[in-house]
Amino acid sequence: MRAETSNCTELVRKTASAFGDQKLRQLFESVVVLDSELVEAIKLRRKCQHFRILVIGRANAGKTTLLKKVCDSVEEPEIYSPSGKKVPILISCIYGLTLLTQRGEHDINNQLIFKSNRQFIFHDSRGFESGSGDELHQVKTFIASRAGAGKLSEQLHTIWYCLPTDTNRPLLATDEHFFNTSATGKVPVVSIFTKFDGLLTEAVSHLVDEGYSWEEAEEGQIDQAMQMLTNNFTKPLMSSKFPPTNLVRLDDMRSETSDCSELIEKTFNALSDNTLKMLFVSVQQNNINLCIRQAMRE
C-alpha cells in the first residue's frame, strides 16, 4: 500500500508539472485535493455511519416539526431502542399540536430515525418544563455515558437546545441551571429559538398596549420582537457560565417556504473537531450548499 501511495504521489507530481499553463496546473491540483478529501470522507463513513444529536426542548418547542424539516420528511420518525428493537409509538393531535409518544416510559436512550435520512440519529429529551430535577439528571447522565463511549459512532456529537419564543416563560430555572453547570463537556450546544413568528404577534400586542396604532405596531414588530428576544433569551444565555456555542432563530417550520439552512450552517461551525465536521458534511442529503461551501474552503 505504501509503494502504491508513493507511486500515485509521484504520478500526481509529474502530471502537475507537465501543465505549462499555471491556471490549468492549479485546477488539476485542486481536483486532486478534493478527491483526497472525498477518499477521507468515505473512510470516515465506513467507521461512523451516523451523526448523533440530542434534542432538548419542551413539549411545545416544535422539535418534531424541526427534525422533519432537517430530514426533509413528512412522516413521523421511527423509534428504536438502544439494542435496535423498534419501539411502538402513539400519535395524537391536541389543539393542532402533533404529539409523538413512546409506548411505556419515555427513554432518552431511544433513537429517533427518519426514513428520508437514516444518517441522522436523534435522541429526545422532554425538556424541563415540569421544574423537576429528574429530567435534568437524566440528560446529564446520558451525556456523560455517551462521552465515555469508545467508538465515534456511539458518542454524542451535538446538542440542539430548543426554546420556544412565543411563551410568557422564556427561561425556566432548570434551563438556567443547565447553562450554568458543565453538563455537556466538550459537546457543542446550539440554542434554537423556535416559533419566532409567534413572538412577532406578541410584539404587535405589546406595542398596541404601549399606545401605538395597529399600523405603527405592525411596522415596528420586527425590531420589538428582536429586542424581546435579546432581553429574554440571548442576554441571559450568553451571560451564563457555560453559554451555548451558537444561536439560531427559526420561524414557523410548518411553512413550506421555511428552511433550516442556518441551523445546519451554525451546527457545522459549532463543531471544533475536523473529523466531526467532515462527518456532518457527509450525512447531508438535503443541504448541498453546505457540501459545496465546505469543498470550496478545502
Image (cartoon, grey):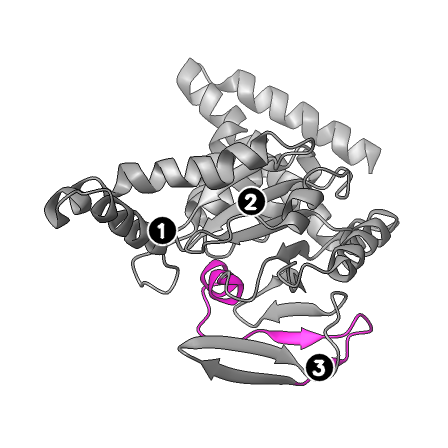
Badge 2 element: strand
The magenta stretch spans residue 61: no
Residue 199 is labelled as 1
**What's the magenta region?**
62-88
The answer to whether 14 appears left or right of 154 in the picture is left
**Residue at point 47%, 31% (across, down):** 296
Q: Earlier in the sequence, mark 3 or mark 1?
A: 3
Closest to the camera, between mark 2 and mark 1, is: 1
Give the residue type that dot 1 points to. Answer: Leu
Badge 3 element: strand
- Give whichever of 115, 225 is nearer the camera: 225
- Give whichever of 25, 120 is nearer the camera: 120
**Residue at point 49%, 27% (across, down):** 28
Give the residue type that dot 3 points to. Answer: Val
- Give whichever of 97, 63 is nearer the camera: 97
* The N terminus: image quadrant: top right
Q: Earlier in the sequence, mark 2 or mark 3?
A: 3
Q: Position of residue 150 (x, y in %)?
A: 88, 49
Q: Label 2, on which residue? A: 191
Badge 1 element: helix
* The C terminus: image quadrant: top right
The CA distance from mark 2 to mark 3 is: 28 Å
Closest to the camera, between mark 3 and mark 1, is: 1
- Give whichever of 258, 44 is nearer the camera: 258
Q: Label 3, on which residue? A: 87
Compared with residue 160, is residue 79 higher up or lower down, i.e. above or below?
Answer: below
Contact between marks 2 and 3 (CB within 8 A): the answer is no
Compared with residue 122, is residue 220 higher up or lower down, i.e. above or below?
Answer: above
The magenta stretch spans residue 82: yes
